[in-house]
Amino acid sequence: MENPLIFDVNEPEFQAQVLEASKQHPILVDFWADWCPPCIVLTPVLERVVKGYAGALRLAKVEVDEGENMRLAGRYGLRGFPTVLLIVNGEEKGRFSSARPDGWVKQFLDEHL
């Protein structure tokens, strides 16, 4: 069963599924690639943290090598992967790069929410 709190998103859907939806609840946006070892390490960390917020937070996963998603990464000036953005009310409230442990991600969220 797919978790509605964690979902894949592409550039054409980003406005509705991330920017507009972030007006209802904060959304972490994980820009990742399957060739990127730190991305693979970070994914389960982000999933655990989001599940721990019991529905108050969502995770949108953007595979940068699919379709027009690299253009989306360029719009946010991303220089490396993974990069995670926190979107609240349609605006970026914070970002971090590289793999991080659960506690670090929770602290990041506590500081920005």
Image: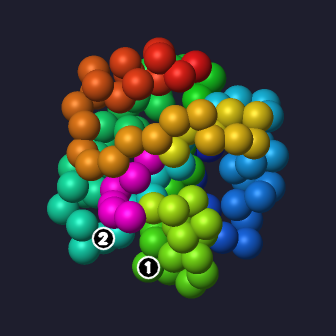
| Residue 78 in view (yes/no) | yes
Left or right side of 62 for 89: right
The residue drawn where x is 24% and y is 67% is: 36
Task: State whether residue 79 is above or below residue 56.
Answer: below
The residue drawn where x is 50% and y is 56% is: 61
Rendered location of residue 100, percent (x, y): 25, 37
Task: State whether residue 77 is above or below residue 69.
Answer: above
Rendered location of residue 44, percent (x, y): 30, 43
Amino acid type of the residue tagged 1 in the rendering? Asp
* Other-residue count near label 1 (Cα within 10 Å), few / some / many at <14 / 14–19 / ≥20: some
The residue drawn where x is 70% and y is 60% is: 14
Magenta extent: 79-84
Q: What is the magenta segment's predominant secondary structure?
A: loop
* Other-residue count near label 2 (Cα within 10 Å), few / some / many at <14 / 14–19 / ≥20: few
Left or right side of 68 for 31: left
Amino acid type of the residue tagged 2 in the rendering? Asp
Residue on which the image places disc 2: 34
Rendered location of residue 19, percent (x, y): 74, 48
